[in-house]
Image (tube, grey):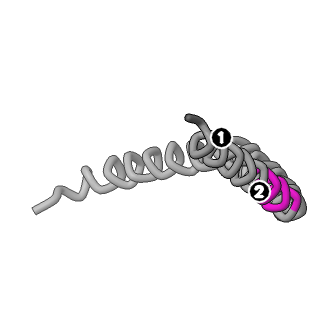
Amino acid sequence: MTSVFAVPFRIAGTAFRLGRAVWAALDAVPRVAATLDEIQATAKHLERLATYAANELPELVYQLEAVRDQLAAIEKSLAVRTSAAP
């Protein structure tokens, strides 16, 4: 059984712990806000990067097809030279 005289000390201790927890939470608010700003900036950067990639992808495919055609032409040329060699 808790003594009547111990109750005020328990209340004071609980209030002190609660005050520290509230202070820690308030102290963390600027860091949380800064982190959210960084996340928002990262999301905007990723959006710009994705837009750039989506715009450049068709050009990349076109260039790769041109390289493939050039390689096919070189392969045919080599095949003709190899079969024509004595």
Looking at the image, residue 25 lies above or below residue 51: above
Considering depth in this image, is 81 or 35 the residue closer to the camera?
Answer: 81
Going 65% across and 40% down the picture, which residue do you hit?
A: 81
* The N terminus lies in quadrant: bottom left
Going 83% across and 50% down the picture, which residue do you hit?
A: 45
Looking at the image, residue 36 lies above or below residue 24: below
- Tell me where residue 61 appears, x and y as whole percent: 79, 61
Give the residue at the far top of this rendering.
86
Is there CB contact under 8 Å for labels 2 and 1?
no
Considering depth in this image, is 70 or 52 the residue closer to the camera?
Answer: 70
- Tell me where residue 57 appears, x and y as whole percent: 81, 61
Badge number at residue 69: 2
Amino acid type, callout 1: Arg
Residue 61 falls within the magenta-colored stretch: yes
Going 55% across and 35% down the picture, which residue do you hit?
A: 86
Badge number at residue 81: 1
Main SS of the magenta segment?
helix
Give the residue at the far left of this rendering.
1
Give the residue at the far front of this rendering.
86
The span shown in magenta is 59-67
- Indicate left or right for 6 with 18 as reference: left
Looking at the image, residue 86 lies above or below residue 46: above
Quarter of the image for residue 2 reads bottom left
Q: Secondary structure at mark 1?
A: helix
